[in-house]
Image: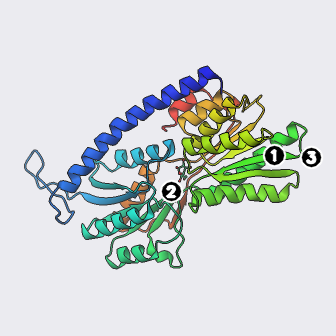
Amino acid sequence: MTGEKRKQRNQKQRHKGKMHLVKNCALSIFLILLVLLPACSAQKTGMTDTGEEAKELVVIGFSQLGNESDWRIANTESMVNTFTEEAGYELLMDDARQSQEKQIAAIRNFILREVDYIVLAPVVISGWEEVLSEARDAGVPVIVMDRRVETEDDSLYTAWVGSDMKAEGERAVRWLEECLKEQGRENEEISIVHIQGSLNSSAQLGRTAGLDEGLAAHDNWKLAARECGEFTQAKAYEIMRDILKVSKDVDVVYCENDNEAFGVMDALEEAGLTCGKDGDVILISFDATELGLTACMDGLINLNVECNPLHGPRVEKIISTLEAGGTPPKESYVEETVFEPEMLTEELIQKRGY
Ligand code: GZL
């Protein structure tokens, strides 16, 4: 990434970071106040200004897995902006900071507080049977959002909404096949560095499966390195920096989210390598966040595969259906696409909402 562009991106990230910090502080204060409220049953009623009995608020216990990435922050904001008191909700949110143990504790707390619904963004795919059984036995419907849970008994959750992560990986591989063909390199040995997301998350498992299919189909594609970047810029930077210290023979870097791609860009630049459209290294990323698409528009990311985080309205639709006595779909997949530099404009990026 050219020094100027990198400075601009880092400034934008710092500004976004400050905004997120302010929002996170506000959110933390809001959440602390919520916890300090008397631990009574979570039904909240009150009187309207005209002295009428206010409609009972629907109480949502939301276990968010963390705030590791721009994608996650946008996902949280979507939930907070959807489940407002004006819309008839009381949102109790817990940030588990990547810990499944904390998520399980939060779900148990929500059950004790007799919330109406639990929304779970699960950090990993396995280990949920016991606590989901407790929620079911307590009669609290669980809506799983974003990543998946693997359970023998799918009555343990009411509905899931999110992305098809393996399909995302397959889109990236199909694009890479075309790209190499256009470059006349379909039979050349291609050295691929793979920076995975948080292990055992359905996002990592799906995107990795997509790449594995590509590696199995192309003998000339060689996996030079595969390490876990935890969906973070810092970890991906360290991994890529250390790889480049050993060898600069890298043709493709497959990053499982935008924040990892930013870390890889920084490491490549430090090693005197360029990436993107006319660069030394083909850079593939996932999420299509504002900063990720800006880097793509600037020709620094060759392909950005959309993974849309704006699940607040989608979860709200499921809950409204349940509130009306209806049955929501068990699974709802989000329609998604891919972005290449020539498809992007500032206006398109700004309109996307994350
Ligand atoms: C994908 C989501 C992933 C994003 C990352 O649905 O779970 O987690 O791709 C985020 O940016 O950290």
> Which quadrant is the N terminus positioned in?
top right
Using the image, tell me which numbered label, if any, was put on residue 164: none
Q: Tell me the CA gap for discs 2 and 3.
A: 37 Å
User: Label 2's element?
Assistant: loop
In depth, the one of 184 and 319 nearer the eye is 184
Tell me the quarter of the picture where residue 118 sits: bottom left
**Label 1 sits on what residue type?**
Ser
Q: Point out residue 302 in the picture as x, y percentages from the top left corner.
A: 71, 36
Q: What residue would you read off at disc 1?
A: 191
The residue at label 2 has a CB less than 8 Å from ligand 1: yes
The residue at label 3 has a CB less than 8 Å from ligand 1: no
Q: What residue would you read off at disc 2?
A: 146
User: Label 1's element?
Assistant: strand
User: Label 3's element?
Assistant: loop
- Local packing at callout 3 (Cα closer than 10 Å; few below 14, some 14-19, many 20+) is few
Q: What residue would you read off at disc 3?
A: 187
Mark 1 / mark 2, whichever is N-terminal: 2
Q: Point out residue 132 in the picture as x, y percentages from the top left corner.
A: 41, 73
- Local packing at callout 2 (Cα closer than 10 Å; few below 14, some 14-19, many 20+) is many
**Label 2 sits on what residue type?**
Asp
Q: Do the residues labelled 2 and 3 touch (CB within 8 Å)?
A: no
